Amino acid sequence: MDVVRTPAPNRNLKRNAAIGAAIVVIAAMTIGLSRLKTAAPEVDKNSVVIDTVRRGSLQREVRGGGVLTPEDVRWISTATDARVERIVVQPGSVVTADTVIIELSNDQQQQSARDAGFQLRAAQADVETMRAQLESERLDREASLARLRAEYQQARLRADADAQLEREGLVPHITKAVSQSSADELARRVKIEEERVRVSASSQHSRLAAASAAVDQRRSLFDLQSAQTKALAVRAGIDGVLQQVTVQAGQRVSAGTTIARVARPDRLKAEIRIAETQAKDVAVGQHAQIDTRNGVVAATVSRIDPAVREGTVTVDLRIDGPLPPGSRPDLSIDGTITLERIPETLSINRPVSAQEGGSGKVFKIVDGGNSATRVNVTYGRASATSIEIRSGLAAGDQVIVSDTSQYDSSDRIKLK
């Protein structure tokens, strides 16, 4: 007898169902985990700087480092090519204007000075010779004029006498006419000679002036050569301190080479460097303070360099009071310039990377100081250490102002 068999369950179907169920479970777990928030990182309170938003006046300031420099500085350079014979005074010495600090030598320059002296004396001798010659010529012309005048007087007297005799019939008319003609001729010659004397005097003055100008030219050359020779003994030029000597004994230097520096240490100013982004509001006349590390002294902005060098602007500060002890040229200092005072505004200590007139994000302390959340903040005008808050924070809010860039991926941090 035949027996009817019942078909066995499909094993493949069961396995496929199990796999499908596992996939569903895994997908559900993935979706659930993706919806979970990332745990907030923990931050030690002692590792961050916290500041409180305050309401009140904000004093805008900019700061920069620099040095004290003398107001009166004299750079000394050579007048001619020369050789350094001796360094008479060493840097750091107190000098007067007439103190010889370096001795130079130049044989050619000394010879040029002597030649210029000879040429001056020769030109002076030429002037004296010309003056004597012109005086002799003047005397000769005046003597000639005197003779003509005497001859004219005689001829005039003779003509008058002949005229009287001619009226009395004692001499013929021709004799009287000849005498009168001679007198008239001599009168004309006297006038001509007087004009020649006048013209000659003017000509002599011009010739003497030309010779005198040649003497003045020789004297100027002699003075120049003498000054250059005298400059071989290099003097300080001002009372002060010899700060620098840039040459050595035996060294040859060319004309115009700077060889020394003298300054007055009692009259100093401050030169500070301000970042070009902060220098736009600095103006002459603004008040400032100078910190020499030994004390603080008041100052005033006296000059602003129009050029930018290496991202900074040099600002000169005039010192308004006595400097602290130990202040000397090239001393490193810090300068703070007061730009303005803003009344009744919100401000905090300037967070890292906060820019004037910009916006950014900071962590505000919440939950009684146990955590901090990131908030958007709009900044206003800035100072060296503080910045104005336009929006995003209120008075009394506490925020982290130190660098938090390592937490940029988190909107919340825990404080412990």
Image (spheres, rainbow, N blue to C red):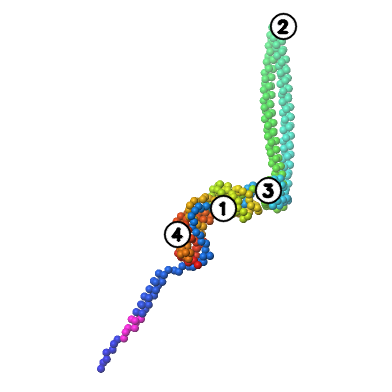
Report helix, strand or loop for mark 3. Answer: strand
Give the mark, 4 or 1, whose residue is nearer the N terminus. 1
**Residue corresponding to mark 1:** 336
Residue 89 position, x and y percent, is 72, 50
Category of crowding for the residue at label 3, using alpha-carbon neighbours closer than 10 angstroms: few (below 14), some (14–19), many (at least 20): many
- Foreground label between 4 and 3: 4
Q: Which residue is mark 3?
A: 240
Q: Count up the numbered dots.
A: 4
In the image, residue 13 lies in the stretch drawn in magenta: yes
Precedes in sequence: disc 4 or disc 3: 3
Depth check: give the residue in front, 296 or 106: 296
Q: Position of residue 220 (x, y in %)?
A: 69, 39
Q: Residues within 10 Å of mark 4 (few under 14, many from 20)?
A: few
Residue appearing at x 45%, y 69% in the figure? 39
For disc 4, the marked residue is 376
**Amino acid at dot 2:** Leu
